[in-house]
Amino acid sequence: MTVPDDGWIRDIISPVTELTSIERRRVDYMDYLMGNEYQLVGLDAGFGNLPVDPYTDGNFRFRRFSTFDYRNNAVSLLAPETFMQSSDLNAFLGDVERTYEAIEEITYSNPLFTEMFRLFDEHTTIRIASHVGVHQIRIFKVGDHQMAPEGRHQDGFDRIAIYMINSVNISGGHLRLSLNQHDDAFLDKELAPGDYAILNDRKLFHNASPIELIDETLAGYVDVFVLTAKEHAVT
Ligand SMILES: [Fe+2]
């Protein structure tokens, strides 16, 4: 399919610091942005200590989840909250109230953790402030399990941000973006460690291409953070 060229979709692969002022203005009008901040790979410390996600079959997905406030370029951990998506959005786990163990201090006290929020806030037209959800996820390639079993979907927020922290012995898993649930992806992009994508979750559907082990005799996994935000008035 062809993407309607109405000016609101941009694809910028560039270190953010290298964007020209014109490109920065364009960022305000686009519905997704892709960039790379390789230093974010330094956020990998807590991924080896993730508990298994109890809401998926088989021990292939590990996760922590917490919500944070972000203001004055600082994050503060909020009291534990459950996480739920409607069955409209998630045919696998819709309407299930999910409780996850909290993100550890070793992770959220790292200045790079705050940097994820800063990037998220800088590159969206909404202000990222309160109740930003953070999913810290390690997904192993086991059997037929895939990164996004629900297929093309939305997460149910105004904006989401995906940060690829690490990929070990995995091929595939490209980020795929579609304009609706039925059309093929207009974008299929590999996310290397340090790459991130910020999406308008109201307009776009996302998915991941199938993942495979590069060396079948070794374990393979990807480590990602997914940040979710709704538009809130800053108080
Ligand atoms: Fe998603």
Image (tube, grey):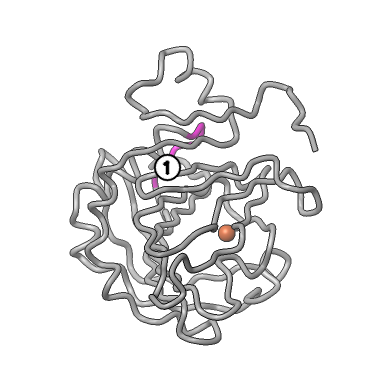
Q: Is 25 left, or right, of 167 in this rendering?
A: right
Q: Residue shown at 56%/70% (left/top)?
A: 84
The span shown in magenta is: 124-129
Q: How many marks?
A: 1
- Indicate yes or no: mark 1 CB to ligand 1 under 8 Å: no
Q: Is 160 left, or right, of 101 in this rendering?
A: right
For label 1, the residue is 128
Q: Quadrant of ligand 1?
A: bottom right
**Spot occupied by residue 182 in the image (x, y as percentages of width and height):** 81, 53
Q: Residue 76 falls in which quadrant of the image?
A: bottom left
Q: Residue shown at 35%/57% (left/top)?
A: 166
26, above or below 55, in the image: above
Q: Residue shown at 42%/13% (left/top)?
A: 21
Q: Is 26 left, or right, of 73 in this rendering?
A: right
2, above or below 79, in the image: above
Query: Label 1 is placed on what type of residue?
Result: Ile
Q: What secondary structure is the stretch in magenta mostly built from? A: loop
**Spot occupied by residue 16 in the image (x, y as percentages of width and height):** 37, 28
Q: Secondary structure at mark 1?
A: loop
